[in-house]
Amino acid sequence: MLHILNKPPHSEAATQMLSTLAKGDSILLIEDAVQALLHADWQGWNAATDVNVCVLKEDAASRGLSAAALNGHATLVDMEGFVELTAQHTKILSWY
Amino acid sequence: MSDESLYRYLASGEKILLDPEGYLVEQANWNEGVAELLAEDEGLTLTEEHWELIRVVRDFYARYEMAPAMRPLVKATKQALGDEKGRSVYLMSLFPGSPPKRLARIAGLPKPTNCL
Amino acid sequence: MSHEHERLVIIRHAPYSSNALREGLDVALVAAAFGQTVSLLFLGQGVLALLKEQVAGAPGQKATLPTIDMLEMYDIDQLLVPQSTLDALNLQVTQLVDGVTVVANDTLPELVQRHSYVMNF
């Protein structure tokens, strides 16, 4: 399952997404969700041993958060990576 | 679909307007006489068996504010009229083609949503 | 219990807040009308759609309760609500329509995993 989140890390949508996460899932943070880069203690990162968390590079860069991304443990993906992720997963759930 | 020329009047002196798919434009225009005319317009003559089903869909609409698709129509018919009549073949025999649509038209309801 | 090819529709928005609730219910009804098995999960604000004392009232908009009541006519009888949602909104299950199943929070991952089709509204 690929979860795509476009709301801030402490939004209702994010909390709801976190409540449904299962081992082996992937998360892709896009738009406002890239703000998670500012919160090292975000629950999504802590789940990251079992969950693959990716951040859309373009959205992080446009918000001035690229440096934060490099300091953290996020995997940055570009648009091609986004497409690849969606192709890798049969089930995709958008949290918006 | 909003092309006025596709709207027409039901064959009666009262100038009751039908939409391009044959549904009443004003639900308030419906009465049993209008139902007879609507049925006639579809080439059907209403018997008591037809009326039973018209009442089933009107009750359904009164309760749920939507006209039923086939599956819930069968279920509602079963609940109201029993297992013998609560079957799609029975509905098809009285309202051939698409029973949910024909019934909704004749019962003066809007087009059923979620329905082919 | 196999849930292969079963659909889970997640409802997360309150009545009248947007048309998300309406769209979610429509999708569930369409799938059910075509004979698919559909379960509904009401997360967060979405649970407000299940309050049994709702009356028609929001001006110019269709009321929600008749549609919720209609679900059983489409054989949609799995109305799931997590305990955390009830807690977060200070709601008791007795305030909701009949037929709601309260599920433990830690069952959500498995619930989402076992359905072949999951849609978020």
Image (tube, coloured by chain):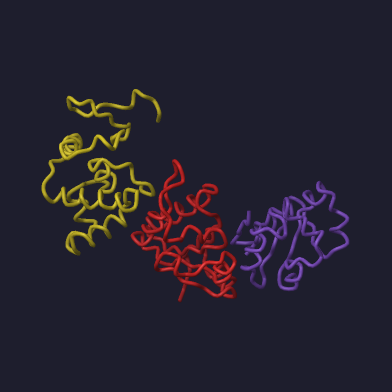
Q: Is residue C72 left or right of residue A10?
A: left
| Left-right relation of B46 to B29 | left
Residue C46 horizontal/vertical position (percent): 53, 58
From what the image shows, is residue B26 above or below residue B53? Answer: above
For the point 58% across and 73% down, which residue is it?
Answer: C105
**Residue C23, position as x, y percentages in the image:** 49, 50
Q: Quadrant of the N terminus of chain C?
A: bottom left
**Which hue is chain C drawn in?**
red
Image position of A23 with respect to B42: above or below: below
Q: Colour of chain A?
A: purple
Q: Position of residue C63 (x, y in %)?
A: 42, 50
- For the colour yellow, the matching chain is B
Image vertical order of residue A18 relative to residue B41, above or below: below
Work out whether residue B31 or residue B57 is closer to the camera in this orientation and state it.
B31
Toward which corner of the image does residue A92 lie, by quadrant?
A: bottom right
Which quarter of the figure has residue C60?
top left
Image quarter of the C terminus of chain C: bottom right
Task: Give the residue drawn at x 76%, y 54%.
Answer: A56
